[in-house]
Amino acid sequence: MSAIAGIYHTNNDPISQDNVTNMLECLSKYPANDTQAWKKENVALVSHTQWITPESIGEELPYYDYEKQLAITADAIIDNREELFSKLQIKDIHRTRITDSELILLAYYKWEEEAPKFLIGDFTFVIWDERKQKLFAARDFSGNRTLYFFKDDKRFAFCTAITPLFSLPYIKKSLNEAWLAEFLAIPINFESTDSSSTVYKDIKQIPPAHSITIEGSKIKLRRYCTLLNEEKLSLRSNAEYEEAFLDVFQTAVTSRLRTRLKVGAHLSGGLDSGSVVSLASRTLSKENKKLHTFSYIPINNFKDWSPKSRVADERPFIKSTVNHVGNIEDNYFDFEDKSPFSEIDEWLDILEMPYKFYENSFWLKGIYEQASKQGIGILLNGQRGNWTVSWGPALDYQAKLLRRGNIGKFLRELHLYSRNIGVKRSRVFPVVAKKAFPNLNRLTSSEGVVPYPILINQDFAKKFNVYSKLEEHDVDTTGLLNRSAYEIRKTQFEHPYYWSINGTYTTKLSLHHSLWDRDPTNDLRVVRFCLSVPETQFVQNGQDRSLIRRATGGLLPDNVRLNQRTRGLQGADGIQRMTADWNLFMSEMELVIKSDFISEYLDISVIKSAMERLKDNALPEFVFHDDFRILMRSLIIYRFIKKLA
């Protein structure tokens, strides 16, 4: 609930008060209920605090425990408080008042560097252990909160944001070209395979699921949490799996409703956000509180170009969920004055780095702004649901059956699935066959699918050996997505760098708007449960996402719960929003291709080709086309480096 910062002089030199003051001044651009600092000789801790939970009101942070000789500053909401109360033997009389930072400190006092393993929630924290003369810091398992740092042989400095670190005279703002090379070569929405690196050469970050220990000049980085090796759950019936699923999911949702302010939620027309909203509304109604939902809708004059299987305007499904669930105040916003183009500079300022998710940038930021205006403290979402609560890829499951020679079961699943989605088996089978035997059915450009254009300047790529690095991490640079859903899911939970961008933008937006984006589908208890459930619970009888569809019977309307025929398509109106600015957009792209510094990093010929195809042909359906993607990503990089110069 804070932007935190601090300095540790490992050579024992005293810390200048001016350095602490300068960092605090940089943090002052974010709203705060309180700002405090704690300094002792060669250590200083800072907290720029936003009071989100009831316990955080008037919290002393940074906090120093004189008896234990431990000091802490923390940016945290801990969700397994009841479990920790028991394990730490905290008396009932103290439980309603104890803050999350005090809980973390007590956990460290009991378990020391093992403490992060016992914490569930969104957190970063830094503890100064005075007795042992060491600094200990940790970040939650999927990096929902950020913590950046600088380290040399004399000093260690850290902060939730990057910019305050540059207020220190010994930290220089210089571009990390190795990071940029990977950013440009990777087609999908993550930045680098080095989860501790950033766009700045001198600034590192604690990776998700890692802790860091500094004792004198020694620094130790350690991963404390790994997944994927969960023991498989074995229950007797579908009903038992559904009951167990709802129990852990409801616990995750309920624990994320703890706020002194209003509770809001992102709501689309799908299963993930819909199930979160249903469970949250049910809990809040018992406390006579409303749930406020926020939904993005296309602009009024949107020309719907989307295929029949996709839904750009999800209002009918959203309204159906709202009416079925009840206890909801629903809000719909088209953000007609915003577009992917209009929001670039603000996003660069917020993120402190370039980004790739321009398609959804205008409404993501817009929902935060509207929720903040309405006094929301917690904004729920279901972003990771595809990989946890609503996991169940029917086509990949059928491909697995076919590949293993389980023909009888495969034919049954194929038949039922085709019936469920209203498509002939003869149309589904070739898709499954390609998934089952990719080497025999490899997609090629002659079949109408072309690789993602290579945007990076090839000399720049060779300079950092970027393709070899990405190949070592099995990163596909073609953008053809030939990997199975099972492989992608495994990577999601095995490698922290795939998911950390979500924590980056939610942390930065939360600081600007004094509200926390919280995802129950990414709760560690939910993740572990879903990874332990047998595959046959997620896909059965031709039904994808079967477990959540069955478990939410009565909680969601059937037209949402059982919908296998259509899926939402958010951001489909992105180009139409830019119609009035299209000439301005293209004029700026002319500056991009004439820029000397950009030609060092980007292949100008690729940009020119994309410009030529789109210059007089800004059709709405090109919003997800590679040509538009090339132009938007190039422009974002251009503006970022220009600001940096």
Image (tube, rainbow, N blue to C red):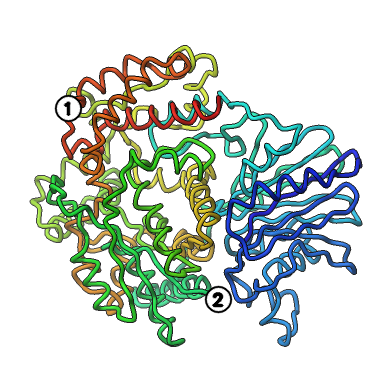
For the question of whether residue 537 can be seen, the reply is no
Asked whether the beta carbons under mark 2 and mark 1 sit within 8 Å of each other, the answer is: no
Of callouts 2 and 1, the N-terminal one: 2
Q: Residues within 10 Å of mark 2 (few under 14, many from 20)?
A: some
In this view, 628 is above or below 429: above
> What residue did someone put label 1 on?
447
Q: Position of residue 159 (x, y in %)?
A: 67, 47
Q: Which mark is residue 260?
A: 2
Query: x, y (%) of residue 362?
Result: 35, 48
Amino acid tagged 2? Arg
In the image: residue 187, left or right of residue 572: right
Residue type of the residue flagged with mark 1: Glu
Answer whether residue 136 is visible to the viewer in this image: yes
Element at badge 2?
A: loop
Q: Residue at x 68, y 54 (%)?
A: 4
Compared with 287, 281 (above or below) is above
In percent of the image, x 29 and y 17: which residue is there?
608
Total label count?
Answer: 2
**244 or 522: nearer the viewer:** 522
33 over 176 or under it: above or below? below
- From the viewer's side, name the closer residue of 491 and 115: 115
Instruction: Give the structural element (helix, strand or loop) at label 1.
Output: helix
Q: CA distance from mark 2 to mark 1?
A: 56 Å
Q: Position of residue 58 (x, y in %)?
A: 69, 73
Between 240 and 197, the one lying in front of the other is 197
Dividing the picture into quadrants, the one containing residue 100 is: bottom right
Give the image location of residue 552, x and y in percent: 31, 74
Q: Against 386, is 218 above or below?
A: above
